[in-house]
């Protein structure tokens, strides 16, 4: 009898476990689908070719004359590119140092602690910090000088694609470095040893054996970091600014003006959404949802790329 | 006994403060096969990897005593360059084949990756010659530019040996090279090693007593970091003098 009851209890327990995991999975899927659905329903009417290729006009509030999202879309790309260019080498060298040089020493422990703390700092604080630092006259090269009537540089303007990109790099550094660290740690010791035994130096081995083997994970980590940059608003608002169009010498898209455009401000899809949302000055919900839809599509495409590259990396691995 | 190629003199090894080898002395004759046998954790791998200084990276590793390879005192080498030259002269084969996820030929060329002056044609010829030695030249005809990791386990391990031979290898260190292979591949590797010893010195760690008996000229039996018995393989397998050795050979420990 007792035995039977036990079996019955166990069966119930397993059914409960199964059902609860199934329900929670279904809930996650539902919330995700719901968000996508709401964004799609509300945003699809805004999507049109002119919406994608025109610059936003000064009167975003007016649905007839609001223009499009070309500069915010391009701003998102530019900011992501700048942030990635800054974060990639630093993250990779941090990861390499942690895996192959720091061992269990003090340097490794302090870098580990520092990245953990950095990962926990809210992005708005990073943005504030960036603004405080990059307005120092020494950082004029990142943005533009603010001069008095006599032409003396008082301070740097602080807000620009370069400043915001640097802040973004600081924001994603801990996550990207961690992902790269894990990718490198997963590469087999026997290949590392094998390369050393053939007379290669440690550095040659890292370059020719370990990094290529971890390539899939390294790229995936970087792409996930890019997704975070695209989705962030706080840093954009503080370190890039709220002007919807590109500032600086015009037309900004001429190659001779590129550097200048990087040192000036603009917008991203997230700051456009903020601006056109009911809390922003633009207050145009349809435009906000339209831009959200575009942003979500870009991020989904990026994640798909990450998954694809991850699977290519895995299938080529086979290095047990 | 002929000329001595590897000489291990009063070697003690510690990991942190944990002893792994104690007062080990071994003379490995040139152009012969020396096998290390003994129960798990007795220090066979530790000694093998000490010969080409592969333990240097392990935190807390310390070695006392001396090891000579071809007359050079291995632990008196100070410059990294010297250590790398030492390693280049010694081929090392691991438990599992460790080919890179590249083609057969790219793996063969790997030891020359940083030698930009070496002519590709000469290198390909050299690789062909080494592949012939390990018996892969015909087997892999037409597959030289396909992924090395698609080969069978035995082919991969022979390819690892061929790759190790790409450098001017006078000494081969093998750590249980057949433990993941089927009997036929094992047999092929044993035959290959027996051929290679005509001009190379070979040290092999094995858990397979039959293998040790079949291929080695000399054997050392390790137990808890010490050498209990060593000498000619024939002697040790037919008339072991120490009780521990007898028990190990009977399969009691
Ligand atoms: N990297 C290391 N750090 C600390 N201790 C180690 C390390 N490698 C080996 N040891 C210890 O040294 C001793 C000898 O290990 P070793 O690997 O040389 O044994 P082995 O004879 O090769 O064993 P097996 O037959 O299982 O491969 C063991 O007690 C092991 O725990
Ligand atoms: Mg071992």
Image: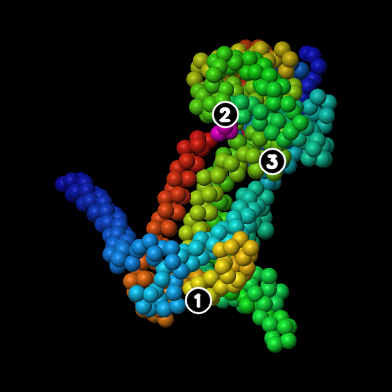
In the picture, residue A212 is in which quadrant? top right
- Please, which residue is most extreme toward the left here? A1
State the image coordinates of residue A131 (x, y, percent, origin top left): 60, 76
Q: Is residue B150 above or below residue A254?
A: above
Q: Nearer the viewer, residue B243 or B58?
A: B58
Span of residues in magenta: B97-102
Q: Are marks 1 and 3 in contact (CB under 8 Å)?
A: no
SS for tag 3? helix
Figure colour scheme: rainbow
What subunit carries mark 2? B
Residue tagged by mark 1?
A242
Q: Are marks 1 and 2 in contact (CB under 8 Å)?
A: no
- Mark 3: few, some, or many residues within 10 Å (few <14, many ≥20)? some
Q: Which residue corresponds to the image point at 57% horizontal and 46% vertical from the top-left?
A: A184
Are labels 3 and 2 assigned to the same chain? no
SS for tag 2? loop
- Mark 2: few, some, or many residues within 10 Å (few <14, many ≥20)? some
Q: Is residue B7 above or below residue A285?
A: above
How far is the residue under mark 1 from the one under mark 3?
Answer: 46 Å
**Mark count:** 3
Residue tagged by mark 3?
A204
Residue tagged by mark 2?
B103
């Amino acid at each position: 009898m007792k035995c039977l009851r036990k079996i019955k209890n166990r069966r119930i327990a397993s059914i409960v476990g199964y059902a609860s995991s199934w329900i929670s999975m279904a809930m996650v899927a539902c919330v995700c689908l719901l968000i996508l659905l709401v964004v799609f329903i509300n945003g699809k009417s805004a999507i049109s070719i002119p919406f994608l290729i025109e610059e936003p006009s000064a009167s975003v509030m007016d649905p007839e004359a609001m223009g499009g999202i070309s500069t915010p879309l391009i701003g998102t790309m530019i900011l992501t590119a700048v942030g990635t260019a800054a974060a990639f080498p630093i993250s990779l060298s941090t990861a390499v140092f942690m895996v192959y040089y720091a061992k269990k020493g003090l340097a490794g422990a302090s870098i580990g602690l520092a990245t953990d703390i950095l990962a926990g700092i809210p992005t708005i604080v990073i943005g504030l910090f960036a603004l405080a630092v990059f307005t120092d006259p020494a950082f004029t090269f990142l943005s533009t000088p603010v001069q008095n009537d006599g032409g003396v540089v008082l301070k740097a303007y602080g807000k620009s694609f370069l400043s915001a990109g640097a802040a973004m790099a600081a924001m994603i550094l801990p996550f990207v470095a961690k992902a790269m660290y894990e990718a490198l740690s997963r590469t087999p010791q026997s290949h590392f040893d094998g390369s050393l035994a053939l007379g290669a130096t440690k550095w040659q081995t890292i370059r020719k054996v370990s990094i290529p083997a971890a390539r899939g994970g390294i790229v995936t980590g970087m792409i996930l970091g890019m997704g975070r940059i695209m989705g962030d608003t706080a840093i954009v608002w503080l370190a890039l600014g709220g002007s919807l169009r590109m500032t600086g010498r015009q037309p900004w898209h001429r190659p001779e003006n590129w550097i200048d455009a990087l040192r000036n401000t603009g917008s991203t899809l997230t700051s456009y959404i903020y601006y056109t949302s009911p809390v922003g000055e633009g207050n145009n919900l349809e435009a906000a949802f339209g831009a959200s839809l575009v942003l979500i599509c870009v991020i989904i495409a990026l994640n798909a790329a990450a998954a694809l590259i991850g699977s290519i990396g895995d299938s080529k691995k086979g290095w047990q | 006994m002929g000329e001595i190629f590897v000489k291990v003199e009063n070697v003690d090894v510690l990991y942190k403060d944990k002893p792994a080898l104690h007062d080990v002395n071994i003379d490995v004759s040139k152009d012969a096969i020396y096998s290390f046998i003994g129960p798990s954790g007795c220090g066979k791998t530790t000694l093998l990897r000490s010969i080409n200084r592969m333990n240097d990276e392990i935190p807390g590793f310390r070695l006392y005593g001396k090891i000579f390879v071809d007359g050079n005192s291995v632990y008196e080498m100070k410059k990294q360059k010297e250590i790398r030259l030492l390693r280049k002269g010694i081929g090392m084969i691991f438990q599992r084949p460790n080919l890179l996820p590249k083609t057969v030929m790219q793996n063969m060329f790997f030891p020359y990756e940083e030698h930009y002056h070496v002519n590709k044609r000469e290198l390909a010829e050299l690789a062909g010659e080494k592949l012939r030695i390990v018996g892969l030249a015909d087997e892999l005809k037409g597959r030289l530019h396909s992924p090395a990791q698609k080969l069978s386990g035995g082919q991969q391990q022979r390819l690892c040996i061929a790759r190790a031979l790409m450098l001017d290898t006078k000494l081969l260190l093998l750590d249980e090279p057949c433990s993941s292979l089927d009997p036929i591949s094992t047999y092929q590797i044993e035959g290959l090693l027996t051929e290679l010893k005509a001009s190379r010195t070979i040290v092999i760690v094995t858990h397979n007593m039959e293998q040790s008996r079949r291929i080695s000229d000399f054997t050392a039996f390790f137990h808890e970091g010490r050498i209990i018995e060593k000498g000619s393989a024939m002697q040790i397998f037919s008339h072991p003098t120490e009780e521990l050795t007898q028990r190990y050979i009977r399969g009691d420990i």
